[in-house]
Amino acid sequence: MHKQFSPIVCLIILLSIVALPAQVIARTGLAITTEGDTRFHLADIVYNTTEDGLEVRGVIKRRQHNGRIRGHVDVAFVDASGKMLKSGSSKPRRANYSNKHQHRAVFKVLFDELPVGATTLQVTHHIGTEGH
C-alpha cells in the first residue's frame, strides 16, 4: 500500500532540496519594468539562478537600422515602496559579430542573490556613459 503525501509535505521536501533563491524567484514572479531611449527596445529580459549567483540578462534591439547600440544598462531590484535594494550595471555587447550593422546587443548582470523584499526588477538602458 502506497502512502500519499500531502501537498504541504511535498513542498517542504522540495524547498529543502532546491536552492532558496530559485524558489523565491519562482514564487515572487518579480515585475519587470524597462526604461530607455525610444530608438531602442529592451527585450527578452530573464532572471535565473546559476552556479555563480543570480543572473539577469536581456537584449537591446534598435528600432531603426542605422547607428550603433551604445551606452550601458542599469539593473536594479526594488521593493514595494520603491526603495532600491541592490543594483548593477553592464555594457551591452554585440550579439551578431558577422553583421557589420549592429541591430541587437546582449547584456548580463550577475548578483550574489535575490534581495529579500524585492518586488520589481528595473532595467534601464542609458545612451551615454555618465556616472559609469
Image: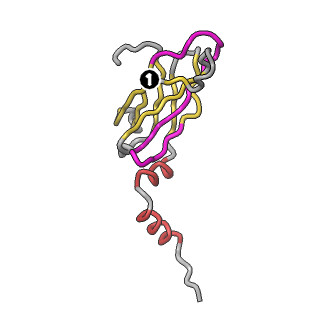
The quadrant in which the N terminus is found is bottom right
* Residue 54 screen position, x and y as percent: 42, 43
* Residue 34 screen position, x and y as percent: 52, 27
At horizontal 51% and vertical 19% (from top left) the residue drawn is 36
Of all residues, the one furthest to the front in this rendering is: 98
Q: Quadrant of residue 66?
A: top right
Q: How is the image coloured?
A: secondary structure
The residue tagged with tag 1: helix, strand or loop? loop
Of all residues, the one furthest to the bottom in this rendering is: 1
Q: Is residue 121 left or right of residue 67?
A: left
Categorize mark 1 by other alpha carbons within 10 Å: few (<14), some (14-19), many (20+). many
Q: How many marks?
A: 1
Q: Which residues are magenta?
A: 46-71
- Closest to the observer: 21 or 93? 93
Residue 47 is inside the magenta segment: yes
Name the residue that disc number 1 marks. 91
Q: Is residue 109 above or below residue 103?
A: below
The quadrant in which the C terminus is found is top left
Q: Quadrant of residue 88?
A: top left
Of all residues, the one furthest to the top in this rendering is: 66
Residue 101 is inside the magenta segment: no
* Residue 63 screen position, x and y as percent: 64, 17
At horizontal 62% and vertical 22% (from top left) the residue drawn is 98
- Closest to the observer: 7 or 57? 57
* Residue 120 screen position, x and y as percent: 46, 37
At horizontal 47% and vertical 48% (from top left) the residue drawn is 25
Q: Is residue 41 above or below residue 116?
A: above
Type of amino acid at the residue the image marks with label 1: Lys
Q: Is residue 81 above or below residue 25?
A: above
